[in-house]
Image (cartoon, rainbow, N blue to C red):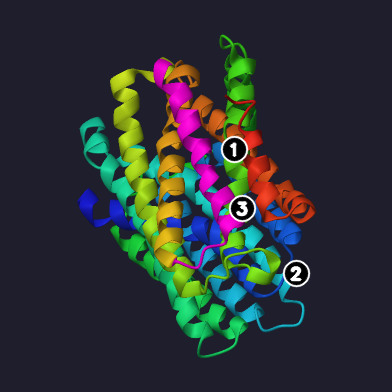
Amino acid sequence: HPPATWVPTLYFAEGIPFFAVSLIAGILYKRLGLGNDVIALYTKLLLLPWSLKPLWSPLLEMFKTKKYFVVLLQFAGGVSLGLIALCLPLPGYFLYTIGLFAVVAFCSSTHDIAADGLYIASLSTKQQAAYAGWQSGFYSVARLFSQGGLIILAGYLEARTDVPHAWMTIFATMGLILLALSLYHAHALPTGGAARHSGSLREIADTFWDVLVSFLKKPNIYLLLLFILLYRAGEGQVVTIGPLFLVDKRAAGGLGLTMDQFGTIYGTFGTLAFLAGTLLGGYFTSWLGLRRALLPLICAMNFPNLAYVYLSTALPTNHVLIASAMSVEMFGYGFGFVGVMLLMMQEIAPGKYQTAHYAFANSLMNLGLMIPGAVSGKIQMALGYQKFFVWVLISSVPAI
């Protein structure tokens, strides 16, 4: 099958479970009445598999084919999302759903490894470059579909039924989509290489150790890793609490947006602004060079958080104004995010094990997002929304 028949669906399938865990889970728990501290802690801990996936990625090279793992993990993720839907009306829904979200997170993070490996193994260098835009494009379509379309649908359903049953439809929809894609990919995907039946754990362990030692011997590696860890300290907090602030009641200091308003403002306009920011950030860095562009990129990523300071102070009711402020913030987020990605590609990845070293740096970057996000709920509840968003700005100072 030509790449055009499976590259778009592969990366759409990669995006759906990730956004289910990273954003929709938090909004779900907020609508069910949980506190911001609980939501922030548990939803950010769910991102841990994306930081730890290099630890088990060698195992995917030892058995079966990349296609086998892609199809299996999509099917398992789809079933898990469907089970989340069934658990929502139960009295102990939180325990069941958080466990199932952990399964989805493990399946999704591991699926990323297999999907990227399949893409690299199945396409020539020329084809990889040609379809790179399709990769990011359809991953962004999944983001727009999840954060925009599904959230708007949730708002429509909440107006007609209770919250648990409205969100049952959302998670059942995501589950059915992943199941359908797994069945399609069982037919449409290339194998990504011959089937493997390796039993040499020693060889894998030796290679992994060599990868790790060579990584830690790179010039200035500890300073670079510290910088990567700090780069997203502000963002990790604002992407956790920001959506909760937008939908929280005005009596609690939030903006009180309904689900359809949130899906339109944050999920649709915000996502489009983020995409525009990433594109322009790439061209800006290419024009100026990474060394000179890095400081402006950090500032662009953090200073637009002033939009949240303004919104939490003024508490405007004009949705055009709110949408404009969020679009500025999301544009800056996308523009600045390019900096840390290019830093990892150009300063850390080059060498014998460039794929593995990039994966290590990427995992640390995810920890830099997860750790501040996990504690952000307690900080927000102690400070209130307005002072919390000022604290987010202060959190950007160490990286600058």
Separation of residues labelled 3 and 1 (CA atoms)? 42 Å
Q: Position of residue 52 (x, y in %)?
A: 63, 40
Question: For this rendering, which residue is in front, 83 or 345?
Answer: 345
Image quarter hosting the C terminus:
top right
Q: Is residue 203 left or right of residue 115?
A: right
Residue 12 found in image quarter? bottom left
Magenta-tinted stretch: 292-318
Q: Position of residue 114 (x, y in %)?
A: 46, 46
Which of discs 2 and 3 lies nearer the camera? The answer is 3
Task: Relative to 220, say whether 316 is above or below.
Answer: below
Q: Residue furthest top?
A: 219
**Kind of element beneath mark 2:** helix
Q: Position of residue 61 (x, y in %)?
A: 50, 38
Say the numbered circle drawn on residue 199. 1
Which of discs 3 and 1 lies nearer the camera? The answer is 3
The amino acid sitting under disc 1 is Gly
Q: Considering only order in the chain, which callout, 2 or 1, is on the residue closer to the N terminus?
A: 2
Are there few (<14), some (14-19), or many (20+) residues within 10 Å of tag 2?
few
Separation of residues labelled 2 and 3 (CA atoms)? 20 Å
Are there few (<14), some (14-19), or many (20+) residues within 10 Å of tag 3?
many
Q: Which residue is drawn at the image coordinates 49% and 84% (left, top)?
A: 157
- Mark 3 lies on residue: 240
Say the numbered circle drawn on residue 95. 2
Q: Residue furthest bottom?
A: 160
Q: Considering only order in the chain, which callout, 3 or 2, is on the residue closer to the N terminus?
A: 2
Residue 206 shows up from this direction: no
